Image (cartoon, rainbow, N blue to C red):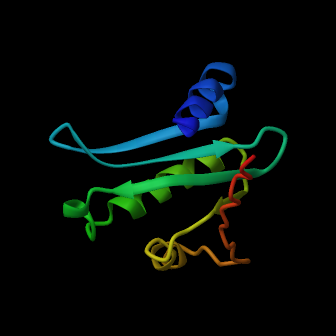
Amino acid sequence: SRLRHLLLTQLAEEPDTVVAVVALADEVPVSSARMELIPGTRFAGLWGGGTVEAWRGRGIYRALVAHRARIAADRGYRYLQVDASDESRPILERLGFAPLTTTTPYVHPVARR
């Protein structure tokens, strides 16, 4: 719900900074993703890509990445950043992305009083 609230606020306050894409099959959503465009920079971030399991392996995720990259380029963004999962990494590398670093997510426990 936190991400939903943040995205709705961003769409209301800065609608040109978020692009959402959805792939449909017979008008049923089978894949979606978003892109966040960072104003005043040449960087855009690709986030939240996912495809329904029954539709994986058909190039839909790849097409959504390529589509968002074209949108970013058309808007003057030169660089794309992706925090890729192990499943997405090979697809992104085939599209020409190169890993620059890795991240290690941590969860900090809330202190009890």
Q: Position of residue 89 (x, y in %)?
A: 51, 76
- Pick the residue in front: 24 or 83: 83
111 vs 38: above or below: below
Residue 45 on image: x %, y %? 65, 53
Would residue 57 appear left or right of 101 to someone viewing this image?
Answer: left
Which residue is depicted at the point 41% across and 64% down? 62
Residue lying at the far front of the rendered structure: 113
* Left or right of 39 on screen, residue 55: left
Residue at screen point 61% across, 64% down: 83
Residue for point 37% across, 42% down: 22
Which residue sits at x=47%, y=71%?
88
Q: Quadrant of residue 58?
A: bottom left
Of 66 and 35, the residue lying toward us: 35
Image spot of residue 63 (x, y percent): 40, 58
- The residue at the far top in this view is 12
Percent of width and height locating residue 47: 55, 53
Q: Is residue 7 left or right of residue 13?
A: left
Residue projecting furthest to the right? 40
In the image: residue 56, left or right of residue 17: left
* 20 w.r.t. 83: above or below: above
